[in-house]
Amino acid sequence: MNIKQAYTELDRVFTSFGGLENGGITRLLYTKEWEQAINHLKLLLKNEDFEVRSDDIGNLIGRIEGTTHHKETIMAGSHIDTVVEGGHLDGQYGILAAFLAMKYLKDTYGKPKRSLELLVLAEEEGSRFPYTFWGSKNFFNIAKPEDVAGITDDEGILFEDAMHKSGYDFRKKDYPHNDLKAFIEMHIEQGKVLEAEEKQIGVVTSIVGQKRYTVKLVGETNHAGTTPMGMRRDVMVAYAEIIQTLTKRAREEGDPLVVTFGQVSLTPNVVNVVPGEIEFTVDTRHDDAAKLKAFSEEVESTIQDIANAHKLNVEMDCWMDEAPTQLDANIVHDIEQAASLRAPGKYKRMSSGGGHDAQIFAQHVPTGMIFVPSIDGISHSPEEDTDIDDLVKGIEVMAEVLYQLAY
């Protein structure tokens, strides 16, 4: 099988489901474009003699039954949804890579000893509705109907209505997964590390933990011309000091710690008034739980101290607190061995700075993850891309890992 040719054609086809004129994709959960991709995958898998089934909420599984150890399953896959105006690789590449690796193994070596399953997760991004990991959280019986009760998309469509319109429903029963012996997710890095170090493969050892805050500072709105500098309770000045202080501290601590200041809302947001209220977000991440906790405490104390110094009232809401995930040491070793065979000298062990379905799987089953480089580190954008030779190399490494685990 010519992997490059096969991948290029499949990528072209699946990029058309939600494809945009600028080369990107918008393919959101339970939309027409999402249904088209799922239905085409069903047809593709059936044509390649995979056993095909879907669960209640729309996760799709293609299975190659094993021979001597058919009750043990090795699984690989990723999510089929995208962000709004996203790229053609995030999620989609992981699915196509796993499919082509399994097809190559089946065509070359016949049926595996252990069963192989391709998992197409219905949703990960949280782009249509304010809920993430709907696919993997249902797969492991975590998600509940009340989690999405009453939530709507930007057009006011209820989650439940969209799901029913696509022909799916809430999970009717819990599913055991005692047969799963490993899960592997292939993904683009969505960062610049591999490209900068001229590596083709990232052997992911961990996924960072995240803490996210919404912070509100309240001072005093006043006249920009008649209020002396020493008499101001200026929230913007305090905000600037918070950014400068915490950014400096994060740089001192060094990688992989990061801190990001995102959404900002200033009141009043006009040129000739000292602003009296600001609301902003803080996102901090690290792959070490103790170090994430320590820096998060520093974030909170720094904000409080600066607010006090400027005579401001402060409210802090920590609305995300996800612990770091360590991936399975044995699976990581297997991936590293495969990379040493298929990409000698062109791989590195690394942590993932973004969240992935693999972090949900790692809580339940031995899990590993493989990265390929992202050109200029760009992702969640129509400009998202990876050199075709790196994409092919990722599929070759995936095939090697699956061969070692299932054959």
Image: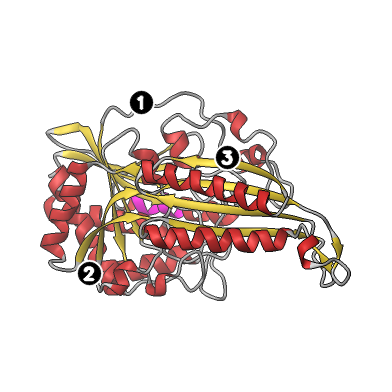
Separation of disc 2 and disc 3 at Cα? Answer: 36 Å
Answer with mark 3 or mark 1, whichever residue precedes in sequence: 3
Q: State the SS at label 1.
A: loop
Residue 165 x %, y %? 64, 42
Separation of disc 3 and disc 1 at Cα? Answer: 23 Å
Give the labeled residue for mark 3.
167
Q: Is residue 186 above or below residue 157?
A: below
Q: Amino acid at mark 2?
A: Asn
Q: Indicate how the structure is coloured in the image.
A: secondary structure
Q: Amino acid at mark 1?
A: Pro
Residue 71 x %, y %? 21, 30
**Residue nearest the viewer, comparing 73 with 36:** 73
The range drawn in magenta is: 39-46
Horizontal placement of 133 versus 68: left or right?
Answer: right
Residue 176's tag is: 1
Q: Is residue 210 above or below residue 171?
A: below
Answer with mark 2 or mark 1, whichever residue precedes in sequence: 2
Q: Residue 157 falls in which quadrant of the image?
A: top right
**Residue nearest the viewer, comparing 140 with 309:** 309
Nearer the camera: disc 2 or disc 1: 1
Residue 2's tag is: 2
**Can I make out residue 21 in this image?**
yes
Q: Is residue 3 above or below residue 42?
A: below
Q: State the SS at label 2.
A: loop
Q: Is residue 44 magenta?
A: yes
